Image (cartoon, rainbow, N blue to C red):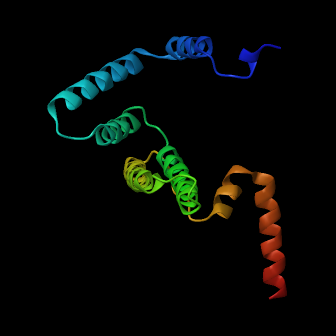
Amino acid sequence: MRASDYFFTFRDFIDLTKRLLSRSSARGYFGILILICAIFFLWLTSTLRFENIAILLFMIAMLYWRWDSKVPAMLALGCIISLALLLIGYQLDILPFADTAAEYIATWAYYFLILSLIKMTVEYFLGEKEITTTPVAQIKENFPPIKQAITKRVKKIRRIV
């Protein structure tokens, strides 16, 4: 066993990059090129802070590559968890400047929640995801044996009542 088996090394980063590039398509390369150009253009010409540019480009990438709406929701959840840990550290005087970082992270969490809501709305109106009435209806459609068991139970309950 080597120490590099337990740590993420530069060689691992190169292997991961090669794997990702070998799986990419022309559309993916074009999107990456456009995002890199947009980063430089916005960074040099606008008065926006780098975090705001990153959030804006994250939204564009999310819509371009059709990421699931759960991605920004999970990032928001991660921000909220780290926010709680930072504030605990600040209250215990372990992290003296955590209150300013907590303000930024709370803003990011809000941005990610808004992005998740925007993506859910886009998915709904474009018909990418179908919203079912109840989870039971979804189970009935996808699993016929469970559907039969549920309908038998419902019939029994209706006879009793």
Which residue corresponds to the image point at 40% horizontal and 54% vertical from the top-left?
Answer: 100
Which residue corresponds to the image point at 35% horizontal and 23% vertical from the top-left?
Answer: 31
Q: Position of residue 67 (x, y in %)?
A: 47, 38
In the image shown, does 40 or 94 lie closer to the viewer? 94
Total number of numbered labels? Answer: 0
Q: Position of residue 144 (x, y in %)?
A: 76, 52
Q: Position of residue 36 (x, y in %)?
A: 31, 22
Above or below 51: residue 14: above
Left or right position of 23 against 104: right
Above or below 139: residue 3: above
Where on the picture, by quarter, is residue 4?
A: top right
Quadrant assignment for the C terminus: bottom right
Which residue corresponds to the image point at 28% horizontal and 28% vertical from the top-left?
Answer: 39
Above or below 92: residue 27: above
Left or right position of 138 against 14: right
Which residue corresponds to the image point at 43% horizontal and 36% vertical from the top-left?
Answer: 66
